[in-house]
Image (cartoon, rainbow, N blue to C red):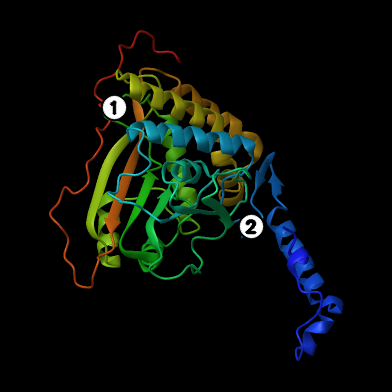
Amino acid sequence: MDPAETAPSQAPSGQGPYESDAEDSTYGDMESLTASITSSIVAYETEHGRRYHAYQSGKYVLPNDEAEQDRLDLQYHSIRIVLDDKLFLAPVKNPQAILDVGTGTGIWAIDTGDAYPAAEIIGTDLSPIQPKWVPPNVKFEVDDAEEPWTYPRDNFDLVHSRVMVGSIKNWPQFLEQSYRHLKPGGWLEMQEIVVDIRTDDDSFLPNSAIQQWCALLEDAVQKVGFSLRLDPAELRRWMEEAGFVDVTVLDLKLPMGLWPADEKLREAGKAQLLATLEGAYGLTVAVWTRMLNKPVEELEVFLAGMRNELKTRSVHCYWPLIITYGRKPDKEGEQAAAPGAGEAPAAPATGEAEGDKSAEGP
């Protein structure tokens, strides 16, 4: 219903100052201000054929256009497969309030909203690229996870983040903010890819272009204070220093390619291979031009070798995938429970590759 239909026709007796509200320009000014802010947030920037966020311009080096959204959804699909189709591994019971930090396309928040209709899910991101039609218990907000959070303290049952390397510079601060805004007994879970593609059988090609690409990305982002290579032991230490108990760190593998013998993992590898092959330019171009000051014309030549090596079936490579979760104590001074509270999914059996019938791509 239009609010105007329910408004009183005149101000109550003795409240004369309200009578001039209809003529006051303040509300119109507020509408203009809101429109201006909204316009600035969606005034995306275009660079080297890719579209980037406008809010906190330049802070995040990956695009937000349709091609990047497709890559993010493929990445999400492959992670869900490796996690046995679970949305999260933390033993959260009957959640009522969930925060998804760095929600991207919003796909995790939407799936979680469908799975937990009694919970309110908030997804935040620098870019408002999420769909408009979502479950009624899901909403999205434009926000920077490294700025002070404005939510009430002790508010969420679960804070979730996924692949925030390159977005979070100060991880201890992120953990402290998560802890502050979780309810006592609430959980934080981070699902992070280590940008250091590996093999367990030394199957990289000589002078591996894949390894050169990973090293280039890490060297570039370190120039501006980031790292793309989280360490599981360091994550555990940061979690415990922030106050979390029952901390679990799972060092898993996200396969890339059709080499796994296991059908489920081969499906994950197929999705991740496609995401990386088609997303390589968007993953690299801002780093290449802004941080390394290299000509964009040379980028595709560099990426060609990396793509060819990824498509070589004898290369049995994977992304390290670190799942970390911990609980805010129910009361001050509570000690951690015995290890093993969370059940880890089976890690990909990277030593079992499908027979190398061909050394060429799939």
Q: How many marks?
A: 2
Front residue of 51/9: it is: 9
Residue at 24% of width from left, 55% of height from top?
247
- Residue designated by label 1: 202
- The quarter of the picture where residue 9 lies is bottom right
- Whole-percent x, y for residue 143 in the image: 56, 60
- Whole-percent x, y for residue 303 in the image: 54, 31
Residue at 55% of width from left, 40% of height from top?
284
- What residue occupies the far bottom of the structure in this picture? 14
- In the picture, which quadrant includes the N terminus? bottom right
Mark 2, other Cα within 10 Å: few <14 / some 14–19 / many ≥20? few
50 displayed left or right of 112: right
Mark 1 / mark 2, whichever is N-terminal? 2
Answer whether labels 1 and 2 touch (C-beta < 8 Å).
Answer: no
Residue at 40% of width from left, 52% of height from top?
160
Query: For residue 57, which numbered disc appears in the image?
Result: 2
51 displayed left or right of 277: right
- In the picture, which quadrant includes the C terminus? top left
Q: Marks 1 and 2: which is nearer the front?
A: 2
Tell me if I can see residue 194 in this picture.
yes
89 displayed left or right of 278: left
Judging from the image, what secondary structure is the residue with disc 1 in? loop
- Whole-percent x, y for residue 86 in the image: 35, 38
Q: From the viewer's perspective, is residue 324 above or below residue 206?
A: below
Front residue of 177/362: it is: 177
